[in-house]
Amino acid sequence: MTLPSPASTQTVRLLLRRARAELPLLLAQLRELVEIESPSHDKAACARALSLAAGWARALGGDVRLHPAGSGADSLEARFGARRGRNPLLLLGHLDTVWPPGTLAAMPYRVTRDRISGPGVLDMKAGVAMAFAALRILRAAGAPARPITLLLHGDEEIGSPGTRVLTERVARAAEAVYVLEPAQGHEGAYKTARKGVGQYRLAVRGVAAHSGVDFPAGHSAVLELAHQLTVVASFTDLQGGLTVNPGVIGGGTLANVVAAEAWAEIDVRIPRAGDAAEIERRFGALRPRDPACTLTLAGGVNRPPMERTPEIAALFARAQAHAHTLGFALGEAATGGGSDGNFTAALGIPTLDGMGAVGAGAHAAHEHILRRHLLPRTALLAAMCLA
């Protein structure tokens, strides 16, 4: 597979100068996006954010298509440049957030000398605003750019249940994928590996009984679940990077009733594709200790891992060289979190992640981006899109 070719030092520096001119519009668009609250489960709200982005794409001459998803999340696909010739680069992101409606009242969009804060500003509306700025920079600089596809979704924060198929279809035609998720940490490392993600629900059915009058007749689902969770916890292999976390549990009705039902929701993170089959086997081998109880297991691995390949390493080396030209050091990192880049990397498409903003507090009340990184990181994204 042919990867995007490097750009000249002079051209990359020109992009940084153009980025400075784009900063006011970048910031204005970022504010517009953040102030459209778009929680994943609010389809209409996500549609408003995607519609706003679609208007920006049309203004840049993009061939825009909105993909409705019935009861699920919509997606925006915008294509720029020639439709024939070399395969496009795919800029991949999402506009849904984890924040419920009304969050802006307590957590408003705020700009200080050093930071910009607000719900979804880091994860990942700044990355989307940066992508549009990068496209404008390339056009203003007259720089030769590859065909580029921008793909934005409205359900990434809930596992991309309605958009994974579209992501994979569009990615198969791409030369490389640049994921607009936030960079790693305050140093802003690009992400060259991500763990795969699994979600399981283990439910136990026992036999209810009065705990004082007829205790021996009961078979506690709560006790059975407690036993099963000790087994599940043993699946964790810290040295191998595999973790299993029973994060939410419930069960029973009253303290004087032997519990008839109990359940747990379990998060799994795997570093290698081969781990998926093994963890599925282990969960599938669970058996009740109390034969009067029954187990029901649902779920599985829903995001394959993004493993660092030679092609991903080559993309990162190019980005690192451009960053040096732009005057900053770029590191790389692996992370336990998943993104839609997991899907594209698993197809064998070279994928570079964390190409959005630098900041901290994703999914937390102190979510923010660091202003000093916006210009060089946007110029870097533009440089990676050069022909």
Image: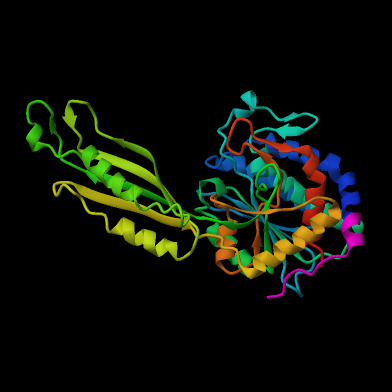
**Image location (x, y in percent) of residue 235:** 36, 53
- Identify the residue at image location x=64%, y=43%: 123
- Asked if residue 145 can be seen in this view, the reply is yes
Task: Spot the residue most to the front.
Answer: 239
Q: How many marks?
A: 0
**Image location (x, y in percent) of residue 68:** 58, 53
Quadrant occupied by the C terminus = bottom right
- Asked if residue 133 can be seen in this view, the reply is no
- Identify the residue at image location x=31%, y=45%: 229
The figure's colour scheme reads rainbow
Residue 88 figure quarter: bottom right
Decide if residue 292 is on the left or right side of residue 241. Answer: left
User: Which span is picked out in magenta?
Assistant: 1-14
Decide if residue 22 is on the left or right side of residue 308. Answer: right
Residue 219 figure quarter: top left
**Image location (x, y in percent) of residue 250:** 32, 36
Decide if residue 383 is on the left or right side of residue 311. Answer: right
Specify whether residue 85 is painted magenta.
Answer: no
**Image location (x, y in percent) of residue 339:** 57, 53
Task: Spot the residue most to the top.
Answer: 106
Quadrant occupied by the N terminus = bottom right
- Identify the residue at image location x=75%, y=73%: 86
- Identify the residue at image location x=56%, y=60%: 306
User: 91 or 202, which is in the foreground?
Assistant: 202
User: 109 or 371, which is in the foreground?
Assistant: 371
